[in-house]
Image: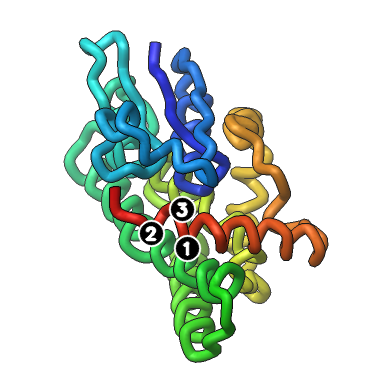
Amino acid sequence: MIDLYSAATPNGHKVSIALEELGLPYTLHALELNQNQQKEDWFLAINPNGRIPAIVDRAEDNFAVFESGAILVYLAEKTGRLMPADVKGRSQVMQWLMFQMGGIGPMMGQANVFYRYFPEKIQPAIDRYQGESRRLFKVLDGRLRDHEFLAGDYSIADIANWAWVRTHKWSGVSVEDLPHLQRWIDAIRARPAVEKGLQMPPSPRELNSSSEEEAAKFSAAARTMLETGQSRNT
């Protein structure tokens, strides 16, 4: 049995989707980020960085794993699924996983901060992060032109990138004129395990379809957390 400590964020949903795809039994512990539960001592014992997601594998002597990419690799290696065993195949998956960890996630995350959460609009920063996110989307679209998935068969690389790319409207980044990326987004969204994973836990709003009023309310709450919680050293 695996304990999953998570929240309704792209990084959190990466892991819940993988667990559902792999059919691994797990118990969800949804943390209230706006109450700084991720900064409490009990959770810092699992992840010293005080961020979600994290897992504890009870079947492996209560082994804790934090960082979403590391969790995905751990689960794939534990089950022998969602990542090839051969050196080249594994390397391809790792390359596209790192593409998300070092590019898609950070750039879209900063786009969210400056486009949605920051108390003042700093247009050069918004343009920078939205523009770089869009450039990375073009890289994905190019890869997907001749590939059904990013690295051979459906893998943790697809899960990691998709969990972020699906929220492109929230980041203010268009996928218009990127037909291969759109096809991939829709194909993964239709997977039953993905639908289940997105409910573990469910988001309080749909990032790509919230009304402006709902978006403003969520942004205000997130801004408060950003200013008083997530950025605080503990």
Give the percent coordinates (x, y) of residue 120: 57, 82
Disc number placed over residue 227 in the picture, else none: 1
User: Quarter of the image containing the N terminus?
Assistant: top left
Q: Residue at x 21, y 46 (%)?
A: 88
The residue sitting at 25% across, 29% down in the picture is 45
- In three-dimensional space, the C-alpha distance between marks 3 and 2, rounded to whole angstroms, equals 25 Å
User: In which quarter of the view is residue 53 placed?
Assistant: top left
Q: Amino acid at mark 3?
A: Asn
Between discs 1 and 3, the one toward the N terminus: 3
In the rendered structure, are the residues bearing label 1 and label 2 in contact, judged by CB atoms less than 8 Å apart?
Answer: yes
183 sits left or right of 209 in the view: left
Identify the residue under disc 3: 161
Quick one: SS at disc 2? loop
For label 2, the residue is 231
Circle 1: residue type = Glu
Q: Residue at horizontal 65%, vertical 42%?
A: 203
Q: Which residue is depicted at the point 78% across and 58% down?
A: 214
Q: In front: mark 1 or mark 3? A: 1
The mark that comes first in sequence, 3 or 2, is 3
Tell me the SS state at disc 1. Answer: helix
Q: Position of residue 167 (x, y in %)?
A: 61, 57
* Separation of residues labelled 1 and 3 (CA atoms): 27 Å
Disc 2 marks which amino acid? Ser
Q: Is residue 60 left or right of residue 126?
A: left
Examine the rendered structure and indicate whether residue 107 appears above or below residue 130: above
Residue 192 in the figure: left or right of residue 150:
right
